[in-house]
Amino acid sequence: MNQSRLQTPELIRAMRDRLGISQEKLAARLGVSFQTVNRWERGRANPSPMAMTLIEQQIRQMGERGQDLLETYFLP
């Protein structure tokens, strides 16, 4: 996993924008609270390793729309 603290907010926001979903809907997909997603996007907290795995799975399901995110944040 390549992600860094500074990049987490950008990753979460880009993923949500491309999916066209709210923080609430992303939270529901990942099984976390809205507040958790909000803290990730604001850079006040970082996703746990398990949450990062779920985020990666969501990005993989996006196919071509998420390929650059996958390459930037998850592939060596």
Image (cartoon, rainbow, N blue to C red):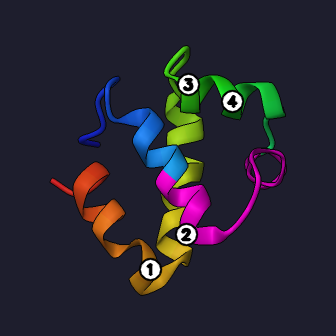
Using residue 4 as the reference point, say whether residue 31 is left or right of it. right
* Magenta-colored stretch includes residue 15: yes
Which amino acid, by three-letter code, is at mark 1? Arg
Label 3: which secondary element:
helix
The secondary structure making up most of the magenta span is: helix
Q: Position of residue 20 (x, y in %)?
A: 68, 69
Q: Nearer the viewer, residue 72 or 76?
A: 72
| Number of numbered discs overlaid on the protein picture | 4
Identity of the amino acid at label 3? Answer: Arg
**Which residue is found at the position 69% from the left and 30% from the top?**
38
Q: Residue furthest left?
A: 76
Q: Residues within 10 Å of mark 1 (few under 14, many from 20)?
A: some
20 with respect to 29 (left or right): left
Q: Position of residue 60 (x, y in %)?
A: 47, 71
Q: In terms of image quadrants, where is residue 1?
A: top left
Q: Secondary structure at mark 1?
A: helix
Segment colored magenta: 14-30
Label located before the other in sequence (2 or 4): 2
Q: Does residue 76 belong to the magenta stretch?
A: no
Q: Are marks 1 and 3 in contact (CB under 8 Å)?
A: no
Label placed on residue 18: 2
72 shown above or below 65:
above
Q: Which residue is mark 1?
A: 65
Q: Which residue is under mark 4? A: 38
Tell me the tag on residue 42: 3
Residue nearer the viewer, 44 or 33? 44
Estimate the spatial distance between the alpha carbons at disc 1 and disc 3, rounded to whole Å.
23 Å
